[in-house]
Image (tube, grey):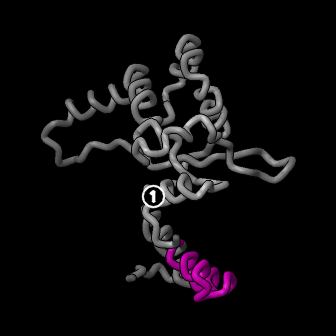
Amino acid sequence: MLRFKEDDSYNYYLKNNGVFLRGWMGLFKNNMVGNKYLYLKNKLAEAPVPHIKGSKPVSVFGGWNLMVSKFSTKVPEAIRFIKFLMSDEAQKILFDVGGYIPINNKVYNDSLYLQKNPQLIFDMNLVKNGIYRPFSVHYTSVSDIVSYYLNLSLKGKLSPHEALFKANRELKSNSILLK
């Protein structure tokens, strides 16, 4: 199970009556698991990330950056496309087809759309209490190092303390993890 790719973990969870799943909200909308498990769609519920009683609940979002290369020969067209992606119309399409959480607040203020999609009330609270993943040019290498040592700990090859120590040492050294 430690070597699952994302879709593999969804299928395993659904096939084996899993209790918790960290996954994308569009699990069924963008057909990540095929039609085989559609009968479970209304038996599953989403929940915010657990938090300590008395503390503020927080969700973390990230990976939604849209950019235009400075080498592009189509900059005006790319900017127009990005503006379209952020429009109410495109945000609704992305939600309806792929289950992606809208980032345009106007979508959450559309009472008719909310009536048709009550799921968005839950999503709106996630967005309201959410923070964006910190931007760092080192994000990928930090993620690789942490996940590498976490995986070794989960496999029982390192104690949690040893894994944290080694990950911390490697992060402080600014080295690159080669697997």
Please name the residue shown 67% across and 39% down the image. Answer: 129
Image position, residue 178 (x, y; %) = 38, 82
Residue toward you, 37 or 152: 37
Residue toward you, 148 or 169: 148
Does residue 59 show up?
Answer: yes
Q: Is residue 154 magenta?
A: yes
Please name the residue shown 43% across and 24% down the image. Answer: 92
Image position, residue 49 (x, y; %) = 68, 49
Q: Is residue 72 left or right of residue 46?
A: left
Does residue 86 show up?
Answer: no
Eyeballing the image, is 49 above or below 141? Answer: above
Eyeballing the image, is 152 above or below 70? Answer: below
The magenta segment is: 147-167
Looking at the magenta stretch, what is its main secondary structure?
A: helix
For residue 134, which quarter of the picture?
Answer: bottom right
Q: Residue flagged by tag 1: what amino acid is it? A: Glu
Image quadrant in which the C terminus is located = bottom left
- The residue that label 1 is drawn on is 6
